[in-house]
Image (cartoon, helix red, strand yellow):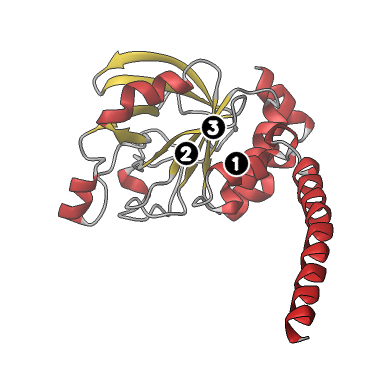
Amino acid sequence: MPLRLNLATLLFSMSSLLFTLPVHAASFFAQVASTPPPSVLPLHHQLQQLAPQATPAALRLAAQALNCADPNAERLAVIDYSLPSTEPRLWVFDLHQHKLLFEELVSHGQGSGDAQAETFSNTPNSHQSSIGLFRTMNSYYGRNGYSLRLEGLEPNVNDLAFERAIVIHGADYVSDAFITQTGRLGRSHGCPAVREEVTYPLIDSLKEDQYVFAYYPDAEWLATSAFLGCTGTAAQLARR
């Protein structure tokens, strides 16, 4: 008798399991089907998926500025100067392919701080970094080797970048070895310098009408930026 009871119980359990499995499977596949593909997620969610180590505020504001300036842009670089130079704080995104192309160390200017950047300006010869939205221009060979010119799009914030020769270039002081020796990266004259090993592919991924967004939680800039507020002025600046 006990054997018959156990067998009956087993058969009943198996039938219940076979009944519920299709239900759970259907629920699972329905959930997967309802998850929107990356292309329809808001841009800042896409960026956060690709670069989970980045500061969420930096990515959110970068997406906000780019959506205002050029919603159809192909490539975007985000620099987060709120992080110390000892940490990767430059991300390059392929927005059309939904890919993270680079996650890199990047320097700041001598006038902006030591290991941590704290001061920014648009002033020639200040040796300080600039924040805000930039559009990339052409690549060229200069005194720092292969380099990428930047056009600052924000008046009184970064619009003297071309005059100041603020460019992306490679530098031997941007390396893990330099951090080990000094406790920080070397510093530039205001340029966002990168590791020499990635100079060519990184610049080539960004040259000619792509975008760079440099973030720092500067209260005045956050409150007045035309691109973060997406005013009518921003459209004119983006088209110039």
Residue type, mark 2 in image: Trp
The answer for how far apart the CA atoms under marks 2 and 1 are is 9 Å
Indicate left or right for 168 with 44 as reference. left
The answer for how far apart the CA atoms under marks 3 and 2 are is 11 Å
Q: Is residue 165 visible?
A: no
Residue at the spot of label 2: 91
Residue type, mark 1 in image: Leu
Quarter holding residue 164:
top left
Q: Disc 3 vs disc 2: which is toward the camera?
A: 3
Indicate left or right for 19 with 69 as reference. right
Residue at the spot of label 3: 99
Indicate left or right for 99 with 14 as reference. left
Q: Quadrant of the C terminus?
A: top right
CB atoms of marks 2 and 1 within 8 Å: yes
In the rendered structure, which disc, 1 or 3, sits on the residue that comes first in sequence? 1
Q: Measuring 44% from the left and 37% from the top, which residue is drawn there?
A: 123
The answer for how far apart the CA atoms under marks 1 and 3 are is 9 Å
Crowding around mark 2 (Cα neighbors within 10 Å: few <14, some 14 to 19, many 20+) is many
Q: Measuring 43% from the left and 23% from the top, which residue is drawn there?
A: 163
